[in-house]
Structure formats: structure tokens, C-alpha cells
């Protein structure tokens, strides 16, 4: 299911050629009426199916980039905190706690209000609200590995502490963090949708959230405009979750076998 | 002894909260600094403009011509006097605006949490009582689907179903405007307005708690103390509730604290969907109208709410699990 979604997103220019923002037909055509617009048209007469396909692109791009950034920050902070310990650990964990007390969504909103709604800002904003959990889990894993023999061996041959942390310890600590990736991607999809629903997304791109918001103004006459992209969202998040569970299961079995 | 332990725990937690809150304040100040324009720009824009000399005079008067450190100290001392700054969008002190909106959000959050916790753990117990059974599989599947739903979309679907197609419930607002209702009638009116928002916000978390409860219980069935209880001849509801469910409730309570921040974030969107004048909608209004002091005021207040909830969760935890807070724990 996830593979189909990815394929659709990548092939958007082929499947739905032309500008999705262009006006194609009569406004507010209901779905299943004409072959030209199988899912109908919106308030301005833009094709819903083509918007849906192009929206998948933005949504998946932003969500994966944000999750990657969150994992990167989280893993870096967690490794440093766990391996160095002492006051560095204490300070970094306090910072993580501070980030956890402020609702992540508000933090993202604040960042966007300061820098303007562009894709890189949105990615960074979502990442800043999501790095704490990977940081905690990485730290816990590193702590449990820190006293093993191979670390002592690396010390004996003269490797520097951070080099040991990132090149020797971290690869062994990654499995549980990777299983978290799916949860973070799924959450990022939902946050991105919520942001663009509120009108704080990039105004020049179609996203599923902004489609729902557009449809909301004609909710009484054409509820399908809001409902269709929402179904897309649910299916995407579901697909990401289930894939993540599958990967986690596979990783666990491999670990037990090893 | 038993009476004093929660107090000691609370004191320890309060001390731990101080540096975290200091960091939040520091972060808020950094964001305020990096926002384009300052209070003088905002003030002059509000009163219709002014010349350069007037701007310089105002900056000197408000201490904005000084370096970051003195300004940070001024910011802290203003905070200590409960002065959160001036909201440019509303033309009133931030604290007034924020406090006026707080009760609605707390009501929405409280009800949604109550729904999520009670229904979630109840259904979780039904699933976890017999893992793998038909009811377990159906409910778990429904929970996963619910968990994948964006709350705001669920809200719109509920509006379509209950306010547009059949006019059973109001689709927005917190109460009927200028209805003149008082007392119980007014409470009932607010309640009717809150049914749909509470459902949209709470159902997602209900799914989360259901899963936690169910998975926790499924693991507990294999534990020694459960088998021992079984061997002693205990069975049925007593075994499920007293031994298995009670222990599975602990991670749920932990999650409740962790999710309180996320729930406040979720209420931003839900309040916008249902046009509820609360803290969350205030945040998105602040962004739309470029009112950074107001947005930071909302952030600080929500951070305080989250800290308070976590403190309460810690206390509840200590009551549920006597091992916590007795020296080694916590």
C-alpha cells in the first residue's frame, strides 16, 4: 500500500499532467459523473483527482524530510548525552524536557510565524517538535551498551570518545530507534495536514490539509471535497503504521535469531 | 508516613520543574528576538505610524536600544510581575486575553481526556481480557483506524453527519450567543456545543489508551503473579480487574502525562474547526495576525498547564503504585 502511494507521488507529473492549480471544468462537479473528472471538481473547477495526486507528493515529501531531520537531531543528541554522561547528559535531557512541556504544535506554529510558511521551515518546525523521543531512546540504548568490552577495546586502541560513540556504539543501538521512524513519519503527516488545514502551509502547493480546508467552505453543498483528501490521509497514516510494525517485527526476529 | 510521602515527592518534582521552566522562558525570549520587527514597530503600526525620531525615543524609553542581556533581564522581571507584554492584535495586555480563553480550552481538554481515559481503558480491558478473541481483533482494528485519523477531519465528518444532514447538534461555538440562559440550562447548552469537539479530540487518544491497555494486559497474562493467582483458584472478573487491569493501567497513566502537551496542540486545530474561543484558536489567530508576544504568552501558559498535569500524574502514579516515591523510585 505504501509502495503504491510512493509510486503515485513520484509519478504525479505523468499520471496527472499539467498544473493542478489550473481550472479544468465546471465548479463543484460531484464525483463519479464524468470520466474527465472522476472525483469531481472543487469550488474553482479544479480537478480533485489531480490535486489529490499532487498533494500526495507534498505531504510525503514534507513528512519524510521532517522525520529524517527529527531522527538525525534525536540520534545525535541522544548519542552525545548517553555516551558522555555527567553534566552534558543532564543539560541535554533538561533541554529535551523543556521541549516536551511546550506543545510541539505550538512550537511549530511559532517557528512558522517568525520565518514564514515555506517548505524548509515547515520541515524544520515539525522536526523540532519530534526529536525528543528518538533522543531518549538512543540515550537509553547507548547507556546500556557503554560499558561493554568492545567500547573498552576501542578506548585502548586510542579512539577519541565521540568517534567511539558514533562509529562503534551507535550502530549497535539503532534498531529500536529505526522502529520509531514509522511512528514519527505518521505523526509528521498528521501535523503537516493540520498546519496546511489552518492555512499555514506553503500557499503555492496542493496539500491534503489545504484541500480539506478549501472544501470546508462549501461543506454543506459538497462534503466530498473535504472527505476525499481525508480518506487519503487516513490510508497514508495507516500504511505507514502497518509498514513500520512489519519492519519492527522483522528486526526483532532477526535480533532473536542472531 | 504514608501521608507525607506524596508531599515529599511533590517537593522534589517542583524543584525539578524550575530549570525546565527557565529553559522554556529562555526559548520564548529567543523566538521573540528573532521575530521580524519589535514592540515599537507593532505599537506604531497600531496607532497609525510615526517618524524616525519618535521611534528612537520610544526604543530608548522601553529599553529596546540595549543589548540582549539587559533586555532578557527586563523580560524576566516583567514575567515575574505577571506581565506577558502587549497584544498588538487585541490591543490589550496578553495576560488578560490569554486568561479569558483558558477556561474553554481546559474544559475541552478535561472532557476529552476523561472520555479517552474511561472509554479507552474500558474497551482496552474488554480486549485484553481475552487477547486474540474476535472482539479483541475487531476493536483493535477499529482503534488503529481511529488512531490514523486527523482529529480535524474527524470533526468535519462529524459535522457533516450530525449538524448538516440531521440538525441534532450545533456545529460551532461554545454556547448559543445571547441566549440569556443561566445556571443548569446554560451548562446544558455548553454541553451540547461540546459533544462534537470532545469526540473529535478525545477519540484519537481513546484509541491510543485502548492499545496501551490491551497490549499491557496481553503481556501480563504470562507473568508469574497472574499464574499464581490463577493457581489459587482466582478467575473471572476479579482476576482480570484486580490483577491484570490494575497493573496495565500504569503505562496508560504515564502516557496521559506525556500526551497532555500533544492534546493542547491538537486543541489548536479542533478549536478552529468548531469555532471555540479557546487558547488554541488564539494561537492560530496570533500567527495569522503576526502577534508574537501573544503567541509566546499562549506557549508559556500551555507549558505551565502541561507541567501541572504532569505533577498530578506523578501523584496519581504514586497512589497507584506504592513502589514509586519511596526513595529509590522516581
Image (cartoon, grey):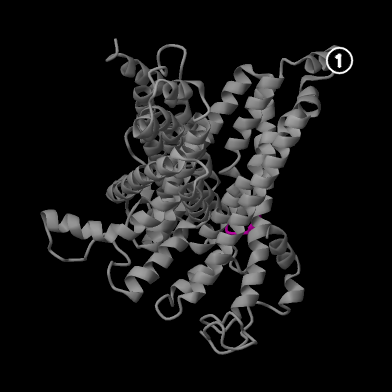
* Residue tagged 1: A158
Residue nearest the observer in this picture, B176 or B299? B176
Image x and y of residue B318, in percent: 37, 22
What number of labels is visible? 1
The answer, for residue B289, to whether it is visible in the render is no
Name the residue at the right extreme. A157
User: Image point 70% across, 35% down: which residue?
Assistant: A252
Instruction: Answer above or below: position of A2 versus A85.
Output: below
The answer, for residue A67, to whether it is visible in the render is yes
Residue nearest the observer in this picture, A152 or B231? B231
Image x and y of residue B119, in percent: 36, 46
User: Image point 72% across, 15% down: which residue?
Assistant: A147
Instruction: Answer above or below: position of A118 versus B122.
Output: below
Highlighted magenta segment, given as a residue range: A116-120
Q: Quadrant of residue B122?
A: top left
Residue A31 appears left or right of B40: right
Image x and y of residue B176, in percent: 21, 65
Amino acid at each position: 500500500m505504501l509502495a503504491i502511494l510512493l509510486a503515485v507521488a513520484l509519478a504525479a507529473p505523468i499520471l496527472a499532467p499539467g498544473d493542478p492549480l489550473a481550472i479544468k471544468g465546471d465548479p463543484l462537479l460531484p464525483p463519479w459523473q464524468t470520466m474527465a473528472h472522476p472525483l469531481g471538481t472543487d469550488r474553482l473547477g479544479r480537478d480533485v483527482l489531480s490535486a489529490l495526486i499532487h498533494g500526495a507528493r507534498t505531504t510525503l515529501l514534507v513528512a519524510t524530510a521532517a522525520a529524517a531531520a527529527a531522527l538525525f537531531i534525536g540520534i545525535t543528541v541522544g548519542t552525545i548525552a548517553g555516551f558522555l554522561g555527567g553534566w552534558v547528559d543532564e543539560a541535554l535531557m533538561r533541554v529535551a524536557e523543556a521541549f516536551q512541556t511546550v506543545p510541539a504544535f505550538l512550537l511549530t506554529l511559532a517557528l512558522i510565524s517568525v520565518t514564514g510558511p515555506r517548505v524548509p521551515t515547515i520541515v524544520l518546525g515539525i522536526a523540532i517538535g519530534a526529536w525528543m523521543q528518538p533522543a531518549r531512546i538512543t540515550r537509553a540504548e547507548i547507556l546500556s551498551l557503554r560499558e561493554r568490552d568492545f567500547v573498552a577495546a576501542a578506548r585502548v586502541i586510542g579512539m577519541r570518545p565521540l568517534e567511539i560513540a558514533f562509529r562503534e556504539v551507535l550502530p549497535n543501538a539503532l534498531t529500536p530507534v529505526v522502529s520509531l521512524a514509522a511512528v514519527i513519519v505518521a505523526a509528521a503527516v498528521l501535523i503537516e495536514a493540520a498546519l496546511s488545514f489552518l492555512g499555514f502551509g506553503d500557499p503555492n502547493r496542493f496539500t491534503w490539509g489545504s484541500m480539506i480546508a478549501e472544501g470546508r467552505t462549501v461543506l454543506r453543498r459538497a462534503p466530498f471535497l473535504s472527505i476525499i483528501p481525508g480518506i487519503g490521509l487516513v490510508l497514508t497514516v495507516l500504511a505507514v503504521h502497518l509498514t513500520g510494525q512489519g519492519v519492527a517485527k522483522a528486526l526483532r526476529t532477526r535480533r532473536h535469531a542472531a | 508516613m504514608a501521608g507525607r510521602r506524596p508531599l515529599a515527592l511533590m517537593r522534589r518534582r517542583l524543584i525539578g520543574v524550575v530549570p525546565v521552566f527557565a529553559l522554556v522562558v529562555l526559548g520564548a525570549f529567543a523566538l521573540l528576538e528573532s521575530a521580524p520587527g519589535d514592540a515599537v514597530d507593532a505599537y506604531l503600526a497600531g496607532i497609525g505610524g510615526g517618524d524616525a525620531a519618535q521611534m528612537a525615543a520610544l526604543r530608548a524609553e522601553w529599553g529596546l536600544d540595549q543589548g540582549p542581556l539587559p533586555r532578557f533581564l527586563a523580560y524576566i522581571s516583567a514575567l515575574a510581575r505577571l506581565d506577558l507584554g502587549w497584544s498588538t492584535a487585541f490591543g490589550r495586555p496578553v495576560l488578560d486575553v490569554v486568561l479569558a480563553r483558558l477556561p474553554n480550552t481546559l474544559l475541552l481538554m478535561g472532557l476529552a481526556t476523561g472520555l479517552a481515559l474511561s472509554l479507552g481503558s474500558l474497551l482496552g480491558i474488554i480486549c485484553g481480557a481475552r487477547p486474540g478473541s474476535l472482539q479483541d481483533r475487531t476493536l483493535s482494528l477499529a482503534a488503529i483506524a481511529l488512531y490514523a485519523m486527523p482529529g480535524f477531519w474527524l470533526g468535519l465528518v462529524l459535522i457533516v453527519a450530525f449538524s448538516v444532514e440531521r440538525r441534532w447538534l450545533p456545529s460551532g461555538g461554545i454556547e448559543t450567543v445571547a441566549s440569556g440562559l443561566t445556571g443548569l440550562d446554560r451548562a446544558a447548552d455548553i454541553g451540547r456545543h461540546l459533544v462534537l469537539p470532545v469526540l473529535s479530540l478525545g477519540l484519537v487518544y481513546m484509541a491510543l489508551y485502548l492499545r496501551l491497555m490491551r497490549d499491557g494486559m496481553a503481556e501480563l497474562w504470562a507473568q508469574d503473579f497472574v499464574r499464581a493467582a490463577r493457581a489459587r483458584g482466582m478467575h473471572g472478573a476479579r482476576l482480570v480487574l484486580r490483577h491484570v487491569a490494575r497493573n496495565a493501567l500504569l503505562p496508560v497513566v504515564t502516557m496521559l502525562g506525556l500526551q497532555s502537551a500533544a492534546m493542547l496542540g491538537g486543541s489548536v486545530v479542533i478549536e478552529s474547526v468548531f469555532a471555540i474561543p479557546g487558547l488554541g484558536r488564539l494561537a492560530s489567530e496570533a500567527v495569522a495576525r503576526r502577534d508574537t508576544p501573544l503567541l509566546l504568552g499562549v506557549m508559556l501558559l500551555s507549558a505551565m498547564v502541561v507541567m501541572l498535569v504532569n505533577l498530578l500524574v506523578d501523584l496519581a502514579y504514586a497512589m497507584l503504585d506504592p513502589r514509586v516515591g519511596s526513595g529509590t523510585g522516581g
